[in-house]
Image: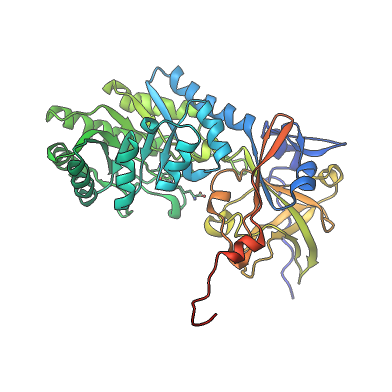
């Protein structure tokens, strides 16, 4: 006999009305249904089809200002370098560049996207545990403002290239503070066992080596302990305190330290979990690194780009399984992989006004890909939805489109930017013909 259906716990999951109320860029009315800023999502689906990523420019601007504002209000000299990996769409980058943000990049592609959006090379930080020789050459040619080195091996590679060109690369040393950020194991980065940075107790000797190597000009220390950090400020404070101690030791040894790169990682409430504010982060930085009197840099990705984005999808069909109701969407794990990869919870809202107020019962919301992991939500309180009904998967602006693939030969979804009551396609849906035309047969099989 099948186990009784677990009922959705209304105390655990926020209601549709709460999900909307907690997101200032969302609204709904009886005429238009769910809207992003001034644009009904039904209008976007009609014009562009589904699945489609939708980004709210106003929300991006508000969040960029909230972060820079909190840092300025704390009295810190701080610059924000948006982590392009979260969402590298050119229009998103352009909105953030216009807010005065710099960029944190981990590939030549991301650096080129940031430059194309109008971000000055000097305002770009190049992070990453394995930059290739061509990428290091590109960074020098382009005049990238800071290259974060993660190993002595990488320092030697960059030193050789820079010295051969007769230039000095501005570098920071990324340290691994061995602090547990209390986040998902796949996105924690500041533990000694992780591949990132150099052990903090080896940093003084390594930093002195950097200063002695030709072609390198060490300008600071960088640290990043993980992503989706929601467990308060304790881990941040512990990491920054260790960095402050390191900077004092470097100074005492007569080594130059101009700035500290504080990384990213600030979490957001996907469900309704408590999440720290930019003010709390600014306070943690001020308390630990403030006494050094140095400018600080921040590399937030998710906090800026996550909440402003959603994935608009349509119901293909509703299927009754053995004791389970399945809503099969035309979006799948190849579009939004976070639930499959990190057991992530994303809010899911119906779009039609009538569906937003219809009676709900538990349903599994799934994609059509041939994997059980292609499940966006289990036992979610959802109305009955007819084929073609629209739904929005929330808080998908960060690590959504950026992580999507063409698995099952599904074309990459379209991307749309909403700005007030305007919207535009900022990346057209990949055509099936373009997807298939990319491949070649070897001559002997043709
Ligand atoms: N700086 C560095 C060196 C990083 O490695 C990262 C993220 C960031 C900044 C930005 O972190 P954020 O502020 O966005 O947390 N795909 C995962 C997240 C991976 C984060 C990787 N590094 C997810 O969907 O949850």
- Would residue 178 be visible to someone looking at this image? no
Please, is residue 406 above or below residue 172 in the view? below
Q: Which residue is at the far bottom? A: 444
Q: Where's residue 420, x and y in %?
A: 71, 29
Q: Is residue 437 left or right of residue 313?
A: left
Q: Where's residue 249, x and y in %?
A: 17, 31
Q: Where's residue 384, x and y in %?
A: 83, 56
Front residue of 117/32: it is 117
Q: Quadrant of the C terminus?
A: bottom right
Q: Is residue 432 left or right of residue 41?
A: left
Q: How many marks?
A: 0
Please, is residue 362 above or below residue 22 in the view? below
Q: Quadrant of residue 263?
A: top left
Colouring mode (rainbow / by chain / secondary structure / one colour): rainbow
Front residue of 431/68: it is 431
Front residue of 373/397: it is 397
- Would residue 150 be visible to someone looking at this image? yes
Q: Quadrant of ligand 1?
A: top left
Q: Where's residue 376, x and y in %?
A: 65, 57
- Residue at the location (63% across, 59% down)? 411
Q: Quadrant of the N terminus?
A: bottom right
- Residue at the location (74% across, 56% down)? 7
């Amino acid at each position: 006999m099948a186990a009784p259906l677990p009922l959705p716990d209304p105390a655990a999951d926020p209601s549709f009305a709460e999900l909307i109320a907690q997101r200032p860029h969302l609204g709904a009315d009886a005429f238009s249904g769910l809207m992003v800023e001034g644009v009904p999502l039904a209008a976007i689906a009609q014009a562009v089809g589904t699945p489609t990523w939708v980004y709210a420019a106003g929300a991006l601007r508000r969040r960029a200002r909230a972060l820079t504002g909190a840092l300025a209000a704390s009295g810190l000299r701080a610059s924000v370098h948006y982590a392009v990996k979260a969402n590298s769409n050119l229009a998103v980058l352009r909105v953030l560049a216009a807010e005065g943000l710099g960029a944190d990049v981990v590939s030549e592609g991301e650096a080129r996207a940031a430059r194309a959006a109008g971000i000055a090379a000097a305002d770009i930080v190049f992070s990453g545990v394995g930059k290739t020789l061509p990428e290091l050459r590109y960074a020098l040619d382009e005049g990238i403002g800071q290259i974060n080195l993660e190993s002595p091996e990488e320092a030697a590679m960059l030193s050789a290239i820079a010295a051969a060109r007769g230039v000095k690369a501005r570098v920071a040393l990324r340290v691994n503070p061995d602090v547990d950020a209390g986040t998902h194991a796949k996105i924690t980065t500041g533990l000694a066992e992780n591949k990132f940075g150099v052990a903090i107790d080896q940093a003084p000797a390594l930093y002195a080596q950097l200063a002695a190597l030709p072609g390198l000009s060490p300008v600071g220390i960088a640290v990043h302990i993980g992503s989706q950090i929601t467990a308060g400020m304790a881990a941040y404070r512990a990491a920054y305190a260790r960095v402050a101690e390191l900077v004092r030791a470097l100074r005492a040894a007569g080594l130059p330290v101009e700035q500290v790169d504080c990384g990213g990682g600030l979490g957001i409430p996907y469900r309704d979990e408590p999440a720290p504010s930019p003010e709390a982060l600014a306070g943690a930085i001020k308390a630990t690194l403030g006494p050094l009197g140095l400018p600080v840099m921040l590399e937030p990705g998710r906090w800026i780009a996550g909440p402003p984005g959603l994935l608009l999808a349509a119901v293909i069909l509703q299927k009754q399984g053995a004791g389970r109701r399945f809503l099969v969407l035309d979006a799948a794990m190849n579009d939004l992989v976070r639930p499959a990869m990190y057991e992530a919870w994303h809010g899911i809202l119906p779009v039609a006004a009538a569906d937003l107020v219809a009676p709900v019962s538990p349903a599994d919301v799934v994609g059509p890909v041939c994997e059980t992991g292609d499940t966006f939500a289990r036992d979610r309180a959802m109305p009955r939805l007819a084929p073609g009904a629209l739904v929005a998967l929330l808080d998908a602006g960060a690590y959504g489109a950026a992580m999507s693939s063409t698995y099952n030969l599904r074309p990459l979804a379209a991307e749309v930017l909403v700005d007030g009551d305007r919207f535009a396609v900022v990346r057209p849906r990949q055509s099936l013909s373009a997807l298939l035309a990319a491949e070649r047969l070897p001559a002997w099989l043709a």
